[in-house]
Image (tube, grey):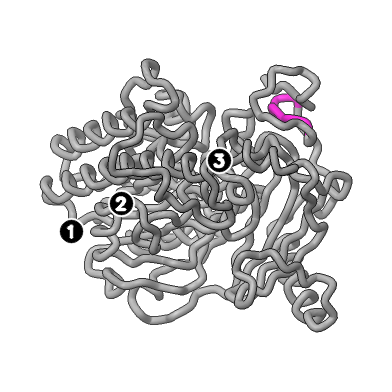
Amino acid sequence: MKNVLYIHTHDSGRVLSPYGYKVPTPNMESFSRTAAVFRNAYCAGPTCSPSRAAMLTSTYPHQNGMLGLAQRGFTMDYSKHLVHYLNQNGYYTVLCGIQHEAGWYLDRKLGAAEIGYQEELTTDNSGYSQEELVDWDKENALKVCQWLKNHNKEQPFFLSYGMYATHRRFPDKIDEDIDPDYALPPYPIPDTKDTRKDFAGYLMSVKRADACFGKVISCLKEEGVWENTIILFTTDHGLPNPFSKCTLFDSGIGVNLMLRSPGALANGTVADSLVSHMDVFPTLCELLELEKPEYLEGKSLVPLLTGEREEIRSDVFAEINFHTSYEPARCVRTKRYKYIRYYDTTYLKTNQSNIDESLTKDYFMKQDLESQTKYEEALYDLLYDPGERNNLAHNREYASVLKEMSQRLLAYQEETGDPILKGEITIKPEWKINRKECKTASSKNPEDYVSFGK
């Protein structure tokens, strides 16, 4: 039986060197030469807990209950979690570092226990500021290495190593080799002094993440389990920038996804196949030769890994319900087109509290971010408009495409019982929810909240 090592960063999208960006991630790039690199992978919900819950259950957020952030009172059916499933199938499950599917993600014990991990290795983070949590990542990487050295090699394991990086706040100490004057923020962020300085913080954070990644991979090889371990490396969603994280643009739902299965024909190759985080669970079932649970919504990537097929799906679905405020939206994406629909037609402005605080957000707020609006429905031709800025929903030449894409979206919703089809989602008192008009997620003003949660 093969082991599974699941390594994940926080808020990284695809802004890594294996995806063509000039960022300091040599260890990730070296690994990519030995793995299948999916260039066209998407999450099912571009906010932390919904994305991870969807991937690790292969059910959509509106199915599993993780409509918003776990630390804000949202929860799910943990009996459908990959960890619970592997526990039942003879695997020893271990968590080190971040998980984001249960409670506060910096809580060392409660989340792991609620999910069902058999062992939790995470080091104490109480002495770290947010800017220093990349150092905590390093301590956790060392813990992983220590565990690999001493683990029972007779029992297969599932080991989750989760990093705080590249979540905000970024490190406030920047290495000399990272010069903000030469740091180009990724699309759709404009190139200004403030946004370059902000992006330099991301570069520092991802550099530290890459060092941790390299350490864990080296330990796996040193302990002789490299050739008997499936390695999954991914992130939850796009960068924590305006028009990225918590949006259904590709800058929000596009993710890195690299998978190394020992002996797979696709190792060392790049795939343009359209894939979803939803496909991870069924893929692991097939690679581990385990029966797939009936509730899985994803499709196995194995035909892509073996070279049997070039595509396994024609579209992907993603959704938003809550981040800090209520912003219900759905999208369906094919290789050519993207259709997005916003369901709260009473508020088609930017939900500013759903954007993480940063120099980049400050820049946009100075440029009248509050006046920006969203379309109730939008259609983008990604071939000619990869930036998703030219809405074709009312273009007669695209009428047939609009009809087809809206029907694809509706099919997903009806087949999975999407509650938004029945109207507004009722806010429960145990959820902490900001008002849509709130500008800052952590506001101390009671009037900025619809519900304070428990």
Q: Which residue is mark 1?
A: 227
Q: Residue 341's image quarter?
A: bottom right
Disc 2 or 1, which lies upstream in sequence?
A: 2
Residue 284 in the image, given as x and y percentages of width and height: 38, 58
- Are the residues at dot 2 and dot 1 in contact (C-beta closer than 8 Å)? no
Q: Nearer the viewer, residue 88 or 267?
A: 267
Q: Quadrant location of the N terminus?
A: bottom left
Residue 86 appears in the rendering = yes
- Asked if the magenta segment contains residue 282, the reply would be no
Badge 2 amino acid: Thr
Q: Is residue 129 above or below residue 228?
A: above
The residue beneath circle 3 is 49
Residue at label 2? 25
Looking at the rendered image, the disc whose residue lies closer to the viewer, 3 or 2, is 2
Picture quarter with the C terminus: top right
Q: Residue at x 24, y 31 (%)?
A: 143
Which element type, helix, strand or loop, lies under badge 2? loop
Q: Amino acid at mark 1?
A: Glu
Depth check: give the residue in front, 352 or 286.
Answer: 352
In the shown orientation, is residue 54 left or right of residue 31?
right
CA separation in Å, label 2 and label 1:
23 Å
The magenta-colored residue range is 429-435
Location of residue 313 with respect to 226 vertically, above or below:
below
Q: State which tag comes first along the sequence, 3 or 1.
A: 3
Q: Nearer the viewer, mark 3 or mark 1?
A: 3
Residue 93: percent from left, percent from top: 33, 40
Counting residues from the start of the chain, the first of labels 3 and 2 encountered is: 2
Query: Mark 3 near mark 2, Cβ–Cβ under 8 Å?
Result: no
Residue placed most toward the observer, 344 or 300: 344
Residue 57 % position (x, y): 52, 50
